Image: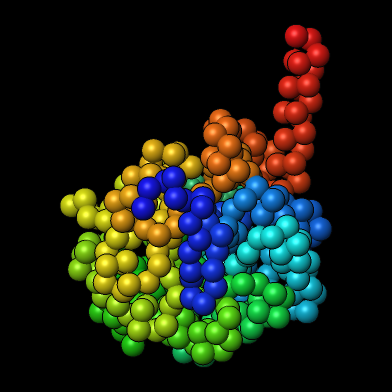
């Protein structure tokens, strides 16, 4: 498939069809007022992407239980009626503008920058430092306690309950966050999972929690709710990590997720483009492998706002859809711009110089506009 078809060809995930193959990647914006309730401003923010022509928006990583899942202060949750009602407004705004929206369900595990008393698969110190801009807390992550069996059950219940709430809020689907170093990825990764029970040891065991969650969520929600999973090799605290078994790991992981009932697989690469995070050490494409061995639709990510790159990924069969992160922040109307052959604005990290929230972004954008207006007046 060439890029010419990207915007005009519709596509299916599960039983749901989408107008085109351009997806907004999930992006945490820590924009609630401390209560985890999505705000009207967030509804306006997500609506813009639908108006801009994206076939699908995957809303930011949202915490799933009141125990140990929350990653960041002001992160949205979907654990109470009030949070659910806030999301319902977001969904209504997107649907009203003709878009479709999934919710990413996230458990931060040992990478929580919100809790002091954290849980992970094992009591292993997380690598590197907390993310800047997402919390006042900075520095090393606390040492997590290893989850006991009843805490693992709570995690699974949290995903089921929050997926049910997402359906009630009107979401078209949910994406299980299995990527970027958060809880499910901590279980998958050998250095953060040293357990000796059925959730540790072999690759199959380390996949078990993610697989059980996909299966349980799929069984809990109706057929009209799409259930996918996001995976990555790299982590927010270990960008260059690659799956040690490369393609062989991929074969096991993808087959288990297909068997569990996943409707799609989303493969992410953060920061340095598709090749950096989506290829194995010997240059094999994990998203393409996922497509080949499961027959499921695959979303690829990593620098794909770049037209040439997007064209290469789609036409070489690496994926069926492309997810755009920073490029969408800079161009909420990216698909329209492509269709109308307008210039794509580069992402300017200065957008986050005063914080990563939606309100800081809107302030920054209006300062840019005012600066531009003044420059236009002077010209
Ligand atoms: C502000 C910001 C927040 C992010 N939050 C999430 C998140 O909640 N869940 C997730 O899976 N990835 C998250 N990511 C990663 C993006 O989804 C995406 O993988 C990354 O930006 C690379 O894509 P790009 O090259 O198109 O920007 C975030 C990225 C950014 C810039």
Residue at 56% across, 59% down: 19
Residue at 73% across, 57% down: 97
Q: Give coordinates of residue 80: x percent, y percent.
A: 74, 78
Does residue 44 appear in the picture of this structure?
yes
The C terminus: image quadrant:
top right
The answer to which image quadrant residue 65 occupies is bottom right
13 relative to 192 in the view: left or right: right
Viewer-proximal residue among 172 and 260 = 172
Q: Give coordinates of residue 197: x percent, y percent.
A: 33, 87
Viewer-proximal residue among 55 and 121 = 55
- 312, above or below 299, in the image: above
Q: Give coordinates of residue 108: x percent, y percent.
A: 54, 67
Viewer-proximal residue among 246 and 198 = 246
315 relative to 366 in the view: left or right: left
Residue at 32% across, 66% down: 291
- 351, above or below 134, in the image: above
- 356, above or below 280, in the image: above
Q: Give coordinates of residue 78: x percent, y percent.
A: 68, 74
């Amino acid at each position: 498939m060439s890029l010419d078809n990207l915007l005009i060809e519709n596509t299916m995930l599960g039983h749901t069809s989408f107008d085109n193959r351009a997806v907004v990647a999930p992006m945490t914006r820590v924009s609630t007022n401390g209560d985890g309730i999505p705000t009207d401003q967030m509804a306006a923010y997500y609506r813009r992407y639908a108006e801009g022509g994206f076939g699908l928006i995957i809303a930011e990583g949202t915490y799933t239980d009141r125990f140990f899942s929350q990653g960041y202060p002001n992160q949205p949750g979907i654990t109470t009626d009030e949070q659910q009602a806030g999301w319902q407004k977001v969904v209504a705004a997107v649907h009203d503008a003709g878009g479709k929206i999934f919710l990413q369900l996230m458990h931060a595990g040992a990478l929580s920058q919100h809790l002091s008393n954290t849980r992970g698969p094992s009591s292993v110190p997380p690598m590197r430092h907390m993310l800047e801009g997402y919390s006042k807390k900075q520095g090393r992550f606390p040492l997590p306690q290893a989850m006991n069996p009843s805490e693992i059950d709570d995690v699974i219940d949290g995903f089921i309950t929050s997926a049910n709430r997402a359906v009630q809020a009107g979401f078209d689907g949910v994406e299980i966050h299995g990527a970027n170093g958060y809880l499910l990825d901590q279980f998958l990764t050998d250095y953060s999972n040293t357990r000796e029970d059925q959730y540790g040891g072999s690759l199959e065991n380390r996949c078990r929690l993610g697989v059980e969650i996909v299966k349980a969520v799929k069984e809990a929600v109706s057929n009209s709710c799409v259930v996918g999973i996001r995976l990555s090799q790299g982590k927010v605290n270990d960008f260059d990590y690659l799956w040690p078994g490369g393609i062989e790991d991929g074969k096991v992981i993808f087959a288990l997720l297909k068997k569990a009932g996943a409707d799609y697989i989303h493969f992410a690469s953060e920061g340095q483009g598709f090749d950096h995070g989506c290829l194995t050490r010997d240059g094999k494409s994990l998203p393409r492998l996922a497509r080949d061995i499961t027959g499921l639709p695959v979303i690829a990510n990593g620098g794909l706002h770049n037209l040439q790159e997007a064209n290469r990924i789609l036409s070489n069969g690496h994926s069926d859809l492309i997810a755009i992160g920073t490029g969408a922040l800079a161009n909420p109307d990216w698909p329209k711009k492509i269709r109308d052959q307008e210039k794509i604005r580069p992402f300017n990290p200065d957008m986050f110089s005063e914080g990563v929230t939606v309100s800081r972004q809107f302030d920054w954008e209006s300062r840019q506009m005012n600066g531009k207006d003044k420059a236009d007046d002077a010209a």
